Amino acid sequence: MDEKNYVNYHILISHSPSNLNRDDMNMQKTAVFGGVKRTRISSQSLKRAMRHSDYYENHIGKPSDRTRQLGKLTAKYVKALQDKYDENLVKSVMSLISGEPEIKENTQSGAVAAWTVSEVEQYCHLYQQLQGQFPDEKEFEKEWKNATDKKKLLDDKTKVKLFREALQNGQDIALSGRMATSGIMTIVDASLAVAHAITTHTVDTDIDWFTAVDDLNQETGETGSAHLDTTEFSSGVFYRYASLNLRQLQENLGDLDRKQALDIASHVLHMLATVVPSAKQNAFAAFNLADFALVSFSDQPISLANAFENPVKAKKEGLMKPSIEALLNYHKSISSAYGIQNDIQSFFSTIDCELKHKNEEAKTETNEESKTETKIPKMSKLSELEEWIKNDGKKLGNEPCKNI
Amino acid sequence: MQEYLIIKLQGAMQSWGGHTFEDYRPSHIFPTRSAVVGLLGACLGIDRSDIQSRADLNASFEFIVRADRRKLKTEHFGRIEEKPLRMQKLTDYHTVLDARKVDGSPRSDAIISYREYLCDAEFTLALGFRDDAVYIMERVKSAIQKPHYTPVLGRRSCPIHRPLFEKIVPAENIQQALDQIEPKQGTLYSEQKIAGSSPMQIRDVPIQDPVRQFATRTIYILGDEHVL
């Protein structure tokens, strides 16, 4: 079977009143969609929340070290690599990679960059090798420059693969990419594309007026407050969309096999369905979980946000149920309209609903009676859907859940 | 009669960057040539460092853009109404570490950066491929139907909301090709002179060396007389 390269994640998550992502005026981020205002949680905010979540550390591994504290980082790596390389070698390598002539205890680089110890180890290995081959200092310098030249590295596929493999302990770089503007760290293109999350409906935000009381002033009989301010907040059902380019992820990790990439893909689902940004959470505690998640394997990474271009209106049962219905109806119409119903898909929902597709193949058959609808399997646990991703869209056993 | 490839760019948020330096990242109100080359290049799997292929792709086609004037069908007290959608600009607040200074060296502190996005926008593109094109229409068509790198609408956070491929149409010229596609209304941005249009200079033609710099071309804008 032709393997589908993109994993599409469509998540619906309802947030109780909160201000999860704001601008420089502390106002909620918004967008206009379908001619009306929506609240928005930016792509960068969601990705950061995911990268710093406990789940990330427990299941994908420690994120890369994102730091500008070169001195502290060097000390950490010297210790980590002490069985393999001596201190001076690691220090020289760190200095060459970062472009800092000398790294002291307090040295800081110009900017925060993403580091992984396994990548530095690769460079140490190369350094030692070249030192052995070219004892002359000038010659060594020339060869090192040659060997680590970004352009040449990218041309030399086997060498770049070595460095990519070294990224396997810093999978956030493989997922979210790394822009290396300085130094000789290689550029990595992100394999995960996370959209700005927007509400499925229009939102009128509220302003909360609040004061802070000074206890000692109160004790002296003062009645006034010590501080007063306002904060904007709202609630809403958010549509989160992300796509994962499996081939790119495999490439970024040094031609990792598809099975391992699918493991990472299943963790991405878990995070998209459970991780919430931390902004103003001490005041709002909108720690909500997703009620709905549709996942598909496809040839094209297509968002289903247009299901909500006509803003969903609250019904007696609230906004989540009509949002799910709008998504499922739209999914049905877009699939047949664009002939992309070959996607392998499955979904999870806490609310009773079903996803059906017209059986297009049956239509072409002579017997019109055989035109039936195929039901896409619904899962009642998020973990089942995670397993399903790990199994490349196959249910227990070997039968793929293809909706045709 | 020649055949033209019709592409639709549609998504809640899009961003078609103009020239800038880090802190303010404006969006043009229509997709630029460099953006279209980048988008198709991503679908074809042209590597960022493969400058020759990118130049070949850039030389393979001419194109025309229409900023579609769309209507949204909406239910109002049981009646179906058509609500016109107006494209709007959105400015997003963002902080950046490692921003470049004028001399190219990185700054040590974080800067505030504003990025512009287009909301409620849809564009229809007609592409005509040259006879001597390195990248021929069929190849581009299959690439956009099964893209190698992730295709996005100017930024990685702006996914496509429908397939890029619309159809292949035969027509006398590129404008006629576009005229066959719904919604058949909207402002045109053409590389060829069209009757009643006004010329504009835009610096969006990728040049081979140095990379990430751009040459100027002239485009011809024909406003929609029914603009709302």
Image (spheres, rainbow, N blue to C red):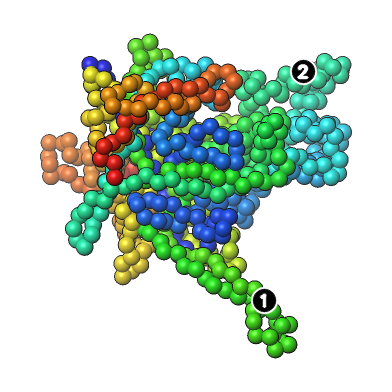
Where is mark 2, residue-wise? A143
Where is mark 1, residue-wise? A226
Viewer-nearest residue: A348 or A65: A65
Mark 1 or mark 2: whose residue is earlier in sequence? 2
Labels in figure, total: 2
Give the residue at x 58% y 64%: A280
When asked about the image quadrant of residue B76, the answer is bottom left
The three-letter code of the residue at mark 2 reads Glu
Badge 1 sits on which subunit?
A
B151 sits left or right of A120 in the view: left
Give x and y (percent) for residue B219.
39, 25
Q: Residues within 10 Å of mark 2 (few under 14, many from 20)?
A: some
When asked about the image quadrant of residue B1, the answer is top left
The three-letter code of the residue at mark 1 reads Ala
Which residue is outermost to the bottom?
A221
Q: Residues within 10 Å of mark 1 (few under 14, many from 20)?
A: few
Which residue is outermost to the top?
B132
A184 above or below A134? below
Give the residue at x 58% y 18%: B209
Viewer-nearest residue: A40 or B198: B198
Give the residue at x 55% y 45%: B114
Give x and y (percent) for residue B94.
57, 48
B26 sits left or right of A93 in the view: left
A227 sits left or right of B83 in the view: right
Give x and y (percent) for residue A262.
50, 42
B192 above or below A227? above
B44 above or below B80? above
